[in-house]
Amino acid sequence: LAHAVKDTLNIIIPSRALNELARVAHDPEEPIYMVVPKQRGQVLFRVKDVEVVSQLIEGTFPDYHQIIPRNYKSRTLVATAALLKACKQAEIFAREGSNVARLDIKQSNGDMQPSEVEISATSEETGKNETIVEATVDGSGVLIAFNVKFLREALEVIKTPNVALETTAQNAPGVIRPVGDDNFLHVIMPMHLG
C-alpha cells in the first residue's frame, strides 16, 4: 500500500475477480494497486496498464473457525501421492454413486503390520474398487465416507510428500493437513455411509 489505511476494512471479493487478477498479474515483483471507493460496493485493482473492477459481495464473511475441528480421535499419516492415486482410481467407480468413497482407517494389530487406509467405491454398472494404502494411525480406526472429488481436489494442491487426515467420527468433518506445512488446511465434510 502506498500509505497506511486508517480504518480496518472488511470486504468480500468474489473469487472470480481474484482469479482474473491472478491471470493478468504475471510478475510477482509488479505492484498491484487496490482501490475501494466509499459507498460504491466495488473494488478496483490496477496492474501495469490493466484494471480489474468487481462488485463486492455484501454481508459478513462466516466465521470459518467455528467449523474447523479443534481436536481429533484419529490422525492418519499417509503418502500424498499414494492417497491421491487411490482417490483417482476410486473416483472412476464413484461417479455413478454420488462420488462417495469410503475410507476405512485401520489401526495396526501389532503383529509387525503397518496401519492402513482402504479406499473403496462401488458402482452398480462397473463393480467395486478397493485400494489399500499404508499409513501411520495415531488413535482409533474409523470408517468414514467423503466426496472423492473434493478429496482428490484437496490432495492435488498439496505439495508435501505426506498428508495427515484428522477425524473424530464418521459423521464429523475431517481435516486434511500437509505434514510440515502449517499454512494450509482443508476441511472436508463427511457423506452418509449407506
Image: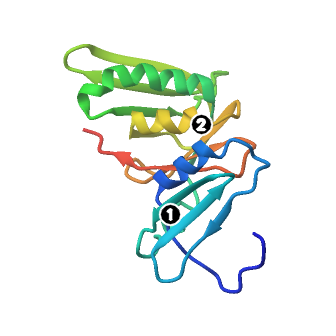
Q: Which residue position holds label 2?
A: 157
Q: Which residue position holds label 1?
A: 13
Residue 117 vertical position relative to residue 191 in the rendered view, above or below: above
Q: In this view, does 68 lie to the left or right of 100?
A: right
Q: Which quadrant, please, contains the N terminus?
A: bottom right
SS state under label 1: loop
- Pick out the residue farthest to the front: 49
Separation of disc 1 and disc 2 at Cα?
Answer: 22 Å
Between 58 and 70, the residue placed more toward the observer is 58
Residue 49 vertical position relative to residue 54 in the rendered view, above or below: above
- Pick out the residue farthest to the bottom: 6
Q: Which residue is drawn at 53% across and 48% down?
A: 20
Question: In the image, residue 121 lies at what x, y percent?
Answer: 34, 25
Question: Within the image, what quadrant is residue 123 found in?
Answer: top left
Question: In the image, residue 82 lies at what x, y percent?
Answer: 58, 22
CA neighbours of label 1 inside 10 A, class few (<14), some (14 to 19), many (20+): some
Does residue 73 appear in the picture of this structure?
no
